[in-house]
Amino acid sequence: MQTDVQKLQTVLNQAVENARQSSERGQVAQYIPELAKADPQKAGIAITLDSGETIGAGDWQQPTTIQSISKVFTLALCLGTMGDNLWARVGREPSGSAFDSILQLEHESGIPRNPFVNAGAIVVTDAILATYQPKEALGEIVRFVQGLAGDDQIFIDGKVAQSEEDTGHRNRALAHYLASCGNLHNPVEHTLGVYYNQCALTMDCAQLSRAGRFLAFAGTLGPNRQQMVSMRRARRIAAIMLTCGHYDGSGDFAYRVGLPAKSGVSGMILASVPGIASIAAWSPGLNQSGNSYIGTQMLEYVTNEMDWTVFS
Ligand code: DON
């Protein structure tokens, strides 16, 4: 579908302008010291269209780690190698609890609710390690994301990965609990080593919006239609993004923005408008559910102005 690019650019500029004027900005994540240094005044948004063109506004060219958005890419990679067998180890239901909650795991015998809560993502990474050694697995993940984005400059921020490893008691607790239930097949430190590094994949909004194109365009990369993920799989991943991508804030996000999307604790959000656009928004301050406060506001403004939703 043809998008009015000029109108879209005006809308993006206004979304960032509104963001700059907002006095409420949320709270920057504190539990990973390297992330706590982020400036909550930053705000950027980028959109990649079906034509392959990427446009943006604000701080859309400033790289940051994608954190939990990496879970979308590892899920796609994992389903590509082990297919539906993954669903014996992870559910597909919204959790209604925080991204790092340990409570449900005990009630549900070590089967995480979905692949986007930390416990579920740790199982997905562990499943990838069935095929690869940790270093190879990480290489595969990076190459996969670079291939999706068409950009071999995408890298891992080792400082952020190390910062998370140094303070990662909660994820260690989750991983050990999974192991005690028989749902972690590799040494805790191997799986978490890969997990911390995938979370530290670093991109700007333009790169992320390009890496997420396969979700908006039926598993393909825009104009040349190269099939990266099967159409059905891309659709299903988007369904899990809609229902679980914002944790216990998923309902509110669907109500306000109306698109499948995944958030990261760095303040990035990846969203897709089927057949039309892939969007990445960034602002580091988070709401109570750990999702970007201003990022959600910018997306709400853009989707309202452009009349983009999966609900009509
Ligand atoms: O495992 C963690 O806590 C982080 N590396 C990722 C969490 C995250 O991004 C949650 N999303 N809003």
Image: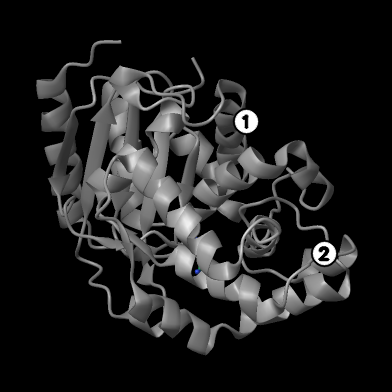
Which residue in the protein does label 1 denote? 236
Quadrant location of residue 97? bottom right
Where residue 165 sits: x, y (%)? Answer: 51, 83
Residue 73 in view, yes or no: yes
User: Residue 183: which disc?
Assistant: 2
Q: Nearer the viewer, mark 2 or mark 1?
A: 2
Indicate the amino acid at tag 1: Arg
Please tell me whether residue 112 is drawn above or below residue 144 in the rendered image: below
Where residue 234 sits: x, y (%)? Answer: 55, 30
Where residue 18 sits: x, y (%)? Answer: 18, 47
Indicate the amino acid at tag 2: Asn
Q: Secondary structure at mark 1?
A: helix
Residue drawn at (88%, 60%) of the image:
108
Q: Nearer the viewer, residue 200 or 23?
A: 200
Please tell me whether residue 32 is drawn above or below residue 129 in the rendered image: below
Residue 288 in view, yes or no: no
Q: Nearer the viewer, residue 262 or 83?
A: 83
Q: Nearer the viewer, residue 88 or 245?
A: 88
Name the side, left or right, on which 121 lies relative to 274.
right
Which quadrant holds the N terminus? top left
- Circle 1 residues within 10 Å: few <14, some 14–19, many ≥20: some
Q: Nearer the viewer, residue 137 or 217?
A: 137
- Of callouts 2 and 1, which one flags the residue occurring earlier in the amino acid sequence? 2
Residue drawn at (39%, 84%) of the image:
33
Instruction: Name, please, the residue furthest toward the bottom.
Output: 166
